[in-house]
């Protein structure tokens, strides 16, 4: 048996609430039908996407998280931006200013995955939070115009203090991310 897994930094409640407020502003001002808004409980900062992983590897992944040395890290929001396909917006994300601690920890975890022969998506670590997935071109263009015309400078620092092993489950109401194991370094 296997599960669809990823490792991520869990968002603090204050950051999740801030993003929820931004989502509501965009939803209410635009009322676009071609946007799938990420549920606040599903928001996270991906460290490594693992894909389908055999159940027997879960204890190895839990041990990697359990034994990972890291300190809570303050991050600041950078700006809303987009990932695009063929110059058409496909994902709205909230970019974060990287910190040496977030990057060091992510790189340590990725190196340990390699050491344990656990495959993962090798895209460079890019600290961001997915806010919406864009389903059609017209909605994507309208959302991009709206966001680019209203770049609020969010500079309040947020404390990242948890690393979580998540399972991604699909349902009719969209994906649900279930925590299988979490290490919290809250002081």
Image (cartoon, rainbow, N blue to C red):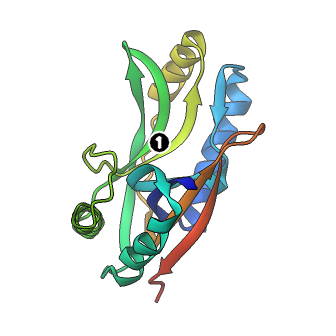
Depth check: give the residue in front, 151 or 110. 110
Q: Position of residue 130 (x, y in %)?
A: 50, 43
- Confirm whether residue 150 shows in the render: no
Q: Is residue 7 left or right of residue 31?
A: left
Q: Residue at x 28, y 69 (%)?
A: 105
Q: Dot 1, how many residues are within 10 Å of its Cα: few (below 14), some (14-19), or many (20+)? A: few
The answer to whether residue 161 is above or below residue 127 is: below
Looking at the rendered structure, the number of numbered marks drawn on it comes to 1
Q: Residue at x 28, y 67 (%)?
A: 116
The answer to which image quadrant residue 36 occupies is: top right
With 51 as the anchor, is 37 left or right in this view? Answer: right
Q: Position of residue 137 (x, y in %)?
A: 54, 11
Q: Which residue is mark 1?
A: 152
Residue 110 location (% of width, % of height): 27, 61
Instruction: Specify the quadrant of the image occupied by residue 82.
Output: top left
Which quadrant of the figure contains the N terminus?
A: bottom right
Residue 163 visible (yes or no):
yes
Residue 181: image location, x then y, percent: 54, 73
Q: Residue furthest bottom?
A: 187
């Amino acid at each position: 048996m296997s599960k669809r897994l990823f490792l991520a930094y869990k968002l603090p409640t204050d950051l999740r609430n801030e993003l929820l407020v931004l989502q509501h502003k965009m939803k209410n001002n635009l009322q676009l039908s071609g946007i799938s808004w990420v549920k606040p409980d599903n928001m996270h900062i991906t460290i490594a996407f693992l894909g389908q992983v055999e159940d027997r590897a879960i204890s190895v992944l839990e041990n990697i998280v359990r034994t990972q040395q890291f300190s809570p890290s303050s991050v600041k929001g950078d700006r809303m931006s987009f990932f695009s396909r063929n110059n058409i917006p496909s994902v709205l994300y909230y970019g974060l200013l990287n910190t040496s601690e977030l990057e060091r920890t992510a790189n340590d975890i990725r190196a340990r995955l390699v050491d344990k022969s656990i495959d993962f998506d090798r895209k460079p670590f890019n600290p961001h939070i997915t806010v919406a997935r864009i389903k059609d071109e017209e909605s994507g263009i309208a959302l991009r115009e709206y966001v680019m015309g209203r770049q609020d400078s969010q500079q309040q620092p947020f404390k990242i203090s948890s690393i979580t092993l998540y399972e991604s489950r699909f349902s009719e109401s969209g994906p649900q991310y279930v925590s299988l194991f979490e290490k919290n370094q809250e002081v």
